[in-house]
Image (spheres, helix red, strand yellow):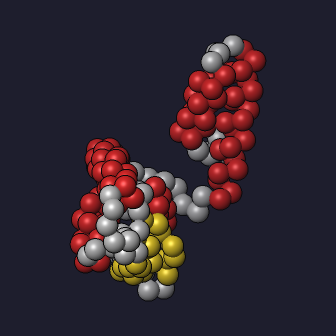
Amino acid sequence: MKRILPHPLLAAIILILWLILQQSAGLGHLLLGSLIAVGVSLAASAILPERVRIRRPLKFAQLMAVAGLDIIRSNLAVMMVLFHPRPAPKAGFIEMQLELKSETGLAILAVLLTATPGSAWLEYDRERSTVLIHVFDLVDADEWVRTVKQRYEALLLEIFP
């Protein structure tokens, strides 16, 4: 079964999304959606280097809630910087040491930092375990490092073995 459907949860999510987008659960849409879901699952097995195992699902839900609130707060902060007349924002780069080693955890952290307005994950050095982040309005680099490590990395270390 693993050869035909290596990522069943991914396939189920793809099928559900397909049916929602089609706004129909007819036999034709169900068959075509299933075919697409199996194809995506097989393609994902070729590019996913490790099995994704979420050790603590409630911590994952907490991470998503924290990240969602941070993204909303960051949207408002960037909007205030853009609309309030003051000296130009001081952009900067931060190089941060990470304890996180899981490729899935690193990918999620990269998505969270890049999805948060005002910051972007630029480069990861696997040998030194450091990440380079660009910040739109860098006021305190140490505060950024503390925030990422306490709010995101700590949770990701608990979620992914």
Residue 154 in the image, given as x and y percentages of width and height: 27, 64
Residue 106 in the image, given as x and y percentages of width and height: 45, 65
Residue under the image location 57 percent in, 28 percent down: 16
Q: Is residue 150 visible?
A: yes
Q: Is residue 105 visible?
A: no
Residue 117 in the image, given as x and y percentages of width and height: 42, 57
Residue under the image location 38 percent in, 71 percent down: 88
Query: Along the line of sight, which residue is nearer the eye, 81 or 112?
Result: 81
Relative side of 1 to 127, left or right: right
Residue 98 in the image, given as x and y percentages of width and height: 36, 76
The answer to whether residue 121 is above or below residue 152 is: below
Residue under the image location 72 percent in, 35 percent down: 36
Residue at the front extreme? 85
Relative side of 71 to 25, left or right: left
Quarter-of-image position of residue 89: bottom left
Which quarter shows the N terminus? top right
Residue at the bottom extreme? 128
The answer to whether residue 107 is above or below residue 14 is: below
Which quarter shows the C terminus? bottom left
Quarter-of-image position of residue 87: bottom left
Residue under the image location 65 percent in, 15 percent down: 24
The answer to whether residue 82 is above or below residue 95 is: above
